Every structure is written in structure tokens, then in C-alpha cells.
Amino acid sequence: MTAAERAERAAAADLLCVEAYNAASGPLQGAALVAVGGYGRAELAPCSDLDVVLVHDEGVGLGATPSTLWYPLWDSGARLDHSLRSLPEMVSAADDDVRVALGLLDVRHLAGDPNLTLRLRTTMLAHWRRHARQRLSELRRLAHQRHDLLGELAHASVPDVKESAGGLRDATILNALVATWLVDVPHTDLEPRRQDLLDIRDHVQEVAGRATDRIAPEIWPQLAERLALPDERAAQAYVRGTGRRITHISRLTWRRVDAVIERPVGVRPRRPDLTPLEAGVALSGGEVVLDGSVRPADDPLLLLRAAALAAEHDVVLAPPTISRLADDVAPLPVPWPPAARRLFVRLLAAGPGLRAVWETLDETGAVDRLLPEWERVRLLPHASVIHRFTVDRHMVETCIEAAGLIRAVARPDVLAVAALLHDIGKGGPTEHSVAGAPIAREIATRMGFDREAVALIETLVRWHLLLATVATTRDPDDPATVAAITERIAEPAAVDLLAALTEADARATSPKAWSSWRASLILDLARRARVALDPGASPAPLVAEEVTLPPAVRRGVASFAVQPVTDGTRLTVIAPDRVGLLADTAATFAMQRLRVRAARAWSQEDCGVSVWEVDDQHLDPAVLRERFEAISEGRIDPAGRLRPADTSVLAPSVAVRAEASAQATVLEVRATDRPGVVYLVCAALARLGVAVRSAHVDTLGPQAVDVFYLQESHAGVLGDQRAAEAAHAVRAALSGES
């Protein structure tokens, strides 16, 4: 696809519009048919709408033209977005909606009175410039809302070529900012990238066969072929790199717009004051610059110093400054001197200011000077759909999250570097924590960390998934659970670091990856591991080990308690213990179509206790109890209503984990998340007479990861044959074979 092909599509559409206008006897004076938006720019994609307006002077008679103009265009099969307005109404519409104002900056004449079109263009451009200061704040607010909803083209798991940050919409806004005459934009860099995105959008719509701007996962291989790139990975790097460049230009431009808006009207910009910050670095006009007396070739720390200060002050690292530094600064010796290491940690621990500064460093090639290993993860998409960012952006976001936790650990420098490097092993065939540990060790050694710190960083990268995995899939009361941590993490301080890294990693993954439920499980397991390693430093428990048993339960009545939490509802169910109790409880929730995010179940005295985290926030415990009693008494059979999920794409995984406990048989179940999974598992076990001593239910994106601690009804560990029978029964139930 090329600009010429888009122009050909626009020319064909123009001919249709002219013929339709003439056939409708459109006036030749005082009225005109104009194209706006992308059609006005003659940039039609294969499935684009034709955005047209029939505009007229007030008092001009249009006759039957408005009622007959559109029919030939509809009959042609064109996708039409049309309106009828007078010239004053066009100005009013632009005043009411800044998005309309943007579209009218690209008015193009199609048919009718060309002088009216010229007056319209002149009027809309002058109106935009005259009111730009008042409109830009609104425009930026709308852009932020769009970015929050759709993410960045460079980093979103399913990017939108048009609406994502760094997409075509932002490129159009940048051109509109140029039209205000308030700020300048590097047009020679922007326009080629914008044309690249137009080509990409054309390919996406051709592959999808419909009007879409979103690049779904299945589109990438064909997109690579159309772009003449070797593979999907190269296509992602090309598309995301293009979006990242536009995002970078956009952020710099908006920073400068802010400075213009803050300056009083009529006040001419002064020469910016130069405020010294540290050796060789100053602040000027909201940007970090060199102070003029320094020679980058003489100071190998200058790049890190400028970057750290820009991030700490959350200001722009001036593009000319970083370009000069990336080209001219002296290379750091190996190992790095302590001052360089401290500056790098300051940069990583700066908080939100790191995001834009790291992007600038990456855009100018400075990251490759500091961390050549970054190339392996640059713009690399995550395989898991629960991640909202590409791997490299996720690692930066983890640093930002870790910056808020550094006061809770003994080695904040280790935490900051481990946060940056925890996923450095991704992109290869080996499991990423295994592959990343030696890479992290090499990097930390090159940075000049002492032997103990190098070992800590390597350990954190190797085991950064351990705490979350064990906490959400194992019984915390089983000694083997704590041992799974302490066998690999030998020092209490290292446990604190691992807990902080786990939290930062989860928060950077997605909002739901660090729910109150998951946080309580992970932090409680960290506490237990810390106590096991240093019994004298036992803090207060974070999670109560027992609940108070209501008197009614002693009389055989089930208790349902509802507690609102910040991200949903916590349901506590207590009833006399029996085989099948958990199945009936799970069926109750599944038949109410409650989405279970997490759950724990255990036996206490002669009662079964289960605590469930669900999304719904308006639940009536009386209704739940009534449904539970109907299921328990056999008045409702959930089996016919809760059927297994379709397993033709992804079959359930059921495994016996013999190493996980010496006191019970541990069954790990992974299946597509849907209402009824826990019920199907527990019902299958109940039919075998197998008791569930405790259960640990968790949801990771579209996948349920559930772990059940099983015993015979007489409290014995299942034998090998019985364990195999239980696994087979559960697998059959989830697959619809039973």
C-alpha cells in the first residue's frame, strides 16, 4: 500500500460524489459538498467511511438536493458519514466539539461552489488559531481518556493503529498543534512515521476484510508478509517502533504546549533561565540541558546524571541534549564506578518520571550504551494476555511500582535493578526466569555491585515468580508450602526483597493482578517464610488463621456472610463439614453466575469454612443460603445446568503434585475460567468419596488455577491408585466425558 493507492481510492470516491451532486442538481453558488477528516486528506483506507458535509450559506435555497444527494452514494455501496449544515452552523459545531474542529481543519472541495469551500477552510483555520489556547486543554483531556482506554500502540497487547497512543489520531492532533502556530513539531520526522502507519492500517483492513484498526494476534503473521518482513517478531518491532516514535514526539510537544498555556496571553517568551542542578547539568524552560561549559567526552557520568535528574524532576530530557550525550559521552569503564551505579539506581527509583526519560533514552540509542541486553526484549510482546504492556515497558513499569516500596527493604538498590531485569530472559525457548538469572548476574557484575548484591539480584530474577505461584496454589498451613520458599530464599532480607518485587511485578502487570485477596496470600506467605528463617523476628499475622464459628452452624445451619472489599465482595461460608460441602457451595455461586476470582477453603473443628472473592458487589446472603439449601437437599440438580467448557481449543490440565505435601494429596487443576469449574472438580471428588481438606482457587486472566489438598474421608493421604483415579475423574468432568 502506498500514498498513491490511497489517493486513487479518494479520486474514485470524489468522482462518485461529484456525479451524485450533479445528479441531485446541487447549486453551483452558495453551496458545496466538501470532504472532511481522513477523506478530506485524501487518505482513504480500504474500508474507510466517506465523511462529507453539504455546506451552504444562510438563505441559499437547496431545493431537493439534500433529499436526493445521498441515495446514489448509498447505492454504490460506499460507507457514508454525512451531514447538512450552514456555514455558521459549521463554526458552532466546531465550538461544541473539539473533535469536529479537528476534522474541519482538513476540509477539501468536492463539488458546488469552490469559493464557499475556500471561505470555509479560511474561517475554520482562523477560528482554530484564535481559540486554540482555550481548546487545547480539552483536546488533551480527551486524548488522555483515549490513551487510558486503549493503551499505547508501542506497548498494548492488542494495539489500535488509529486510536492508541502514538497512532494516527495522535499524528493528526500533532498536525493540528502545528496549525495553532503556538508550538513547533519536528514535521520531517513525524510525516514519514504517519505515512508508515497509514500503510499499516491499509494492510490490517485488507487482511481483516473489514473496517478495523486493531491488530489482533492472528493478523501479525500476514502483516509481516505484506510488509516484507521476515517474521511476526519483526513486524511487531516495526509497527510498535513507529508508534513509539510518534508517542515520543507527542509527549515532547504537549510538554511545550503546557508551557505556552501557562504563559499569560500577550507576554512574549523570555530566554529561559538556566538553573544549575548538578555538575554539567541544568534546568532550562522545563527541560534538562547541559550547562554549556561541559564536554561530554570528558565525563562518562554525564549521561546518567542528566537522565536521573530529568526523571527525578519529572521533566523533559531535552532531545538535543540526549542526542549529543548518546553520541559523544565517554563510555563507562567496566566495572562501573560506584558513582555511576548510584546514578543508575537514582534513575530507576525516580518513580513516574522514569517512564518518559527511559523512552527518550531508548529512542536515541542511549539505552543500548548502558544496557546492550535491552535489545532482546525491546518491544517484545507478552505471551500472556493478562499483561497490558510489552515486555520492555512492563519492566520499566515494574521499576516505577518498586520505587514506592524501596523503604520497606534493606537493599533498595538491589530491588530497583532486579525490577528492571526481572524479565530480561524473555524472548527465547528457555523459561524466562531460568534464562534471565545468568544475564542479570552478568549485568550486575558489569555495574560493579559487590558479590552479595550480585547473588541477590540473580536470585530475585531466578525466583521472581516463586512467591506468587506458591502463595496462590498451596496451603499456607502445610509445612511444605513455607519450605518451598525457604529452600530457595535463604535470608529474611531476601524474602522482603522478593515480596516487594512480587508486588511491583503484579501491579505493573494489570490492576487485577494485585487484588486484596492475592496481596493477603502473598504477604502472609512472605511473613511465614521470614519467621521460619528468623523465628525471633516474628511480626503479627497478616491473615487470621481461624474464624469464629456462628452458633447457628452448631445447630446445622449454614452461615453466609457478605463483606464488601475495594475490588468486589468477600463471601464467607461456614457449615457442618461433610464430603461434597465444597461442591454444593461452588454450585451455589456458579448458578448465580458469580465470577470467582479467588477462594480458600479449609476444615475448622467439625465445620467446613470457605472464603470466596467475587466481582459482584450487591449480594443477598439470604438468597445465597436458600439456593445452597435447595442444592444440598437435592431440590435443585446443578449438574444439568453447569456444563463443562469447550475443550477443543485448550484441554484442561490436571496433575498430582506429590512433592507439594506430606500430609495430603495435592491436585493442581488448570482450566478455562468459567462459572462451574470448582463445582465440577469438587463434585467429581465427592462421587469418589474423597474429602477436600483445603482448596486454593485463583484466576489468571482467562485461566483458572485451582489447587486441592485431598484426603480420604478417614483423613489419610490418597494412595497412588486413588490419586490417579481422582485426577482422571476430575479431568473427565472438566472435559464433559463423565
Image: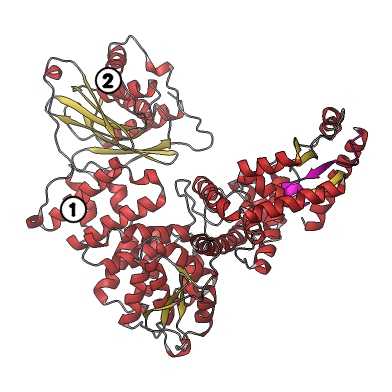
Q: Amino acid at mark 2?
A: Pro
31 sits to left or right of 418: right
Residue 425 appears in view: no
Residue 155: assigned label: none
Q: Nearer the viewer, mark 1 or mark 2?
A: 2
Q: Say which quadrant the N terminus sits in.
A: bottom right
Please state which of residues 183 and 453 is positioned toward the viewer in this rendering.
183
Q: Amino acid at mark 1?
A: Ala
Task: State the image coordinates of residue 575 (x, y, percent, origin top left).
Answer: 19, 21
Measure the C-alpha gap from mark 1 to mark 2: 36 Å
Residue 636 vertical position relative to residue 22 in the rendered view, above or below: above
Q: Say which quadrant the C terminus sits in.
A: top left
Task: Give the mark nearest the N terminus, 1 or 2.
Answer: 1
Residue 516 vertical position relative to residue 689 in the rendered view, above or below: below
When asked about the image quadrant of residue 333, the answer is: bottom left
Task: State the image coordinates of residue 233 (x, y, percent, origin top left).
Answer: 59, 59
- Callout 2: SS: helix
Residue occupied by mark 2: 621
Please state which of residues 606 and 453 is positioned toward the viewer in this rendering.
453
385 magenta-colored: no
Q: What's the magenta region?
A: 25-42
Residue 529: assigned label: 1
Q: In the rendered view, how is the structure colored?
A: secondary structure
Task: State the image coordinates of residue 384 (x, y, percent, origin top left).
Answer: 47, 48
